[in-house]
Amino acid sequence: MNSIEEEKLFKIRFEQHKDIIYRLCLGYFNQNRALAEDALQEAFMKAWIYRKQFREDANWQTWIYRIAVNTCLLKIKQEKKEKDKTESFTQQPQAEYDAEKESKIQKMYQCIEKLNSQNRILILMVLEGIPYATIEETLGLSSENLRVKIHRIKKQLYTCMSHGTL
């Protein structure tokens, strides 16, 4: 494949996956749009830089998810090293919103933040509506193991939402 074809294919893949990857990043950064946009750009830059390492027999969607997840985790780790993690990030003002619903959503993301990294990745992918088959392939889980993990995570989140602890 020549460089022009490669660039066209990458642009198509970017357009197909940018919104999903952005929302995945938003989940990692407690809805902080600036951090999510940075992670999105960095993930796709890495995908472009390392495109030659992508195996054509593999699933590109799974590959970019893995890059995005690793990018988000690395950014979080770097943030923790630079300073103590702040309790909440700046929220973007909204024209109209339901305060009770917003409060529940923030509480849910706070509970998700308390999960271990693999469970956090898994539940964010589920919330994003990513097909189970893709999640299984990305995280290396069997179908049965995935369903059991999702059930356990949901129970943990319910407990956290009800009592404030996992």
Image (cartoon, rainbow, N blue to C red):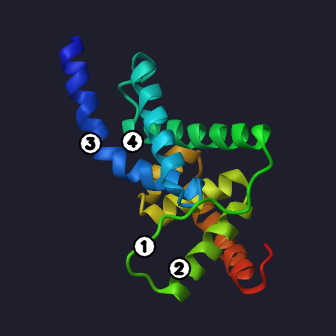
Query: 89 or 140: nearer the eye?
Result: 89
Label 3 element class = helix
Label 2 element class = helix
Query: 95 or 155: nearer the eye?
Result: 95
Q: Is residue 98 visible?
A: yes
Circles 4 and 1: CB atoms closer than 8 Å: no
Label 1: which residue? 94
Please name the residue shown 43% across and 27% down the image.
Answer: 45
Circles 3 and 1: CB atoms closer than 8 Å: no
> What's the CA distance linking mark 4 and mark 2?
31 Å
Which of the two discs, 3 and 1, sits closer to the camera? Answer: 1
Circles 1 and 2: CB atoms closer than 8 Å: yes
- Circle 2 crowding by C-alpha within 10 Å: few under 14, some 14–19, many from 20: few
Query: 1 or 100: nearer the eye?
Result: 100
> What's the CA distance linking mark 1 and mark 2?
10 Å
Q: Which mark is residue 61?
A: 4
Mark 4 vs mark 2: which is more N-terminal? 4
- Circle 4 crowding by C-alpha within 10 Å: few under 14, some 14–19, many from 20: some
- Specify the quadrant of the image occupied by residue 49: top left
Q: Quadrant of the N terminus?
A: top left
Q: Looking at the picture, how far across and down is residue 83, in whole percent? A: 78, 43
Q: Give the side of residue 50 with respect to residue 71, left or right.
A: left
Please name the residue shown 42% across and 58% down the image.
Answer: 130
Q: Looking at the picture, how far across and down is residue 27, in whole percent? A: 55, 58
Label 2: which residue? 102
Label 3: which residue? 15
Residue type at numbered disc 3 = Glu
